[in-house]
Image: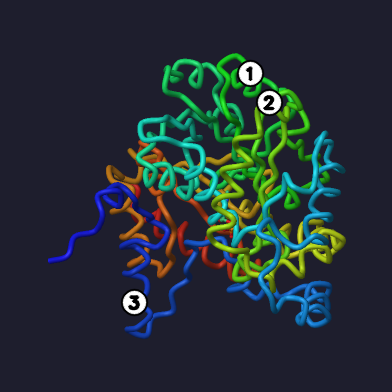
Amino acid sequence: MIMRAQRMRDVRSDIRGPLFEEALRMQADGLDVLKLNTGNPGTFGFGLPDSLRQALLAGMDRAVPYSDLRGMADARQSILSYHQGKGVQGLAMDDIYLGNGVSELAHMALTALFNPGDELLLPAPCYTLWSNTARLMDARPVFYRCDEASGWYPDAEDIRRKITPRTRGLLIINPNNPTGALYPRPVLEELLDIAREHRLLVFSDEIYDRLVFDDAPHTATAALAPDLPVITMNGLSKSHNVCGFRSGWMVVSGPRERTREILTGFTQLAAMRLCANTLMQLVVPAALADNESTQAMIRPGGRLYEQRRATLEVLGTVEGISFVPNAAAFYLFPKLDTQLFGITDDRAFAMDLLHATNILVIPGSGFELDTPDHLRIVMLPEAAQLRAAMERMKEYLETRRA
Ligand SMILES: Cc1ncc(COP(=O)(O)O)c(C=O)c1O
């Protein structure tokens, strides 16, 4: 038998794991399964914004050759202006790299910067792209607690306790997946103080920064730390419904003398893969100029707003479920009363739920949480469908009550 490489041993994803495979099997048997495992708006009828369609049609011929290894100049220019507009200082065009989604860029960033045994501090719960990528590098993911009782904000004391001589980086995911939390400025400032004190590289995944409800401001981490190397990640998958385009970018900010080696490493890797897909680069300026498509989804009456309202309304009536309403993104991460529902293993619970209701959700352990008492709901189906699904879930939970 041919064995996988050793470095694959700890990589795992529940989002496309056994629960997902079971859902596919049920679908093949003719069952109507509602798959709430991925945040993929296009599969729930969220279409291509017209601004992006026009840019694609008009620019296609420009996309034929390999582009600059960092990305097309007009795409980088629009990204530069976007981040400057959020208060990030000292940026230049060559601090920006386009990539095939944040997923590829996370891989690129950790490959360039992490040695085996280096430690990366990550939030728990965590979107597993980051923890898995750290494992692939033979780096050590170390999880810091996000505190549900404090709106899922990171627990700075826990971070301090977990710092060792091997700690190299601190990841912030804001707005967060799976909690939907949006961190206020003082929370970010406290995290940056820790990074300053311990000379940590800061990674800030801000892919949901345009999907913030109720006009709340999103603070760019890098804007608060011109004195620190910060690698900010962003992209169009969620704000413009184009997950399949694989359209993302990273921005390196901070003092030049401290970012030089980072940029050298990123340039080496960007050159190895020649360039990011150019078709998706074409749409970046148009997307960043088109805030209206995103706003239309998140204001009252918009799909994301109403879907969230429907979910919160139903789940708010379920005894044994509590939650922090998400301030951003389209995820809810409710807590289950494990005693009341007789839950000891959240993966087994999610499998039972799938069989009983035909609804696929990912349990908290799929997000590196070490307690079996959460699940993530992706609020992307139309409000009426989501409301009906939550009612089914409620009925099922009633049958499980001890
Ligand atoms: C926090 C976070 N970062 C990155 C990604 C992946 O983004 P992309 O489609 O740009 O690879 C996701 C996707 O769900 C995400 O939730």
Q: Is residue 319 visible?
A: no
Q: Position of residue 64 (x, y in %)?
A: 70, 79
Picture layout, residue 258 above or below residue 105: above
Residue 21, how many percent across, how many down?
33, 69
Q: Secondary structure at mark 2?
A: loop
Q: Specify the label residue 196 is tagged with.
A: 1
Q: In the structure shown, which secondary structural element does the residue marked by tag 3 occupy?
A: helix
Q: Horizontally, is 6 left or right of 334 in the view?
A: left
Q: Which mark is residue 228?
A: 2
In the rendered image, residue 111, in percent from the top left (x then y), is placed at 47, 45
Report the front residue among 38 and 233: 233
Q: Amino acid at mark 2?
A: Leu
Q: Amino acid at mark 3?
A: Met
In this view, 15 is above or below 56: above
Ligand 1 shows up in the quarter that is bottom right
- Which residue is pictured at 66% across the width and 48% down the height? 250
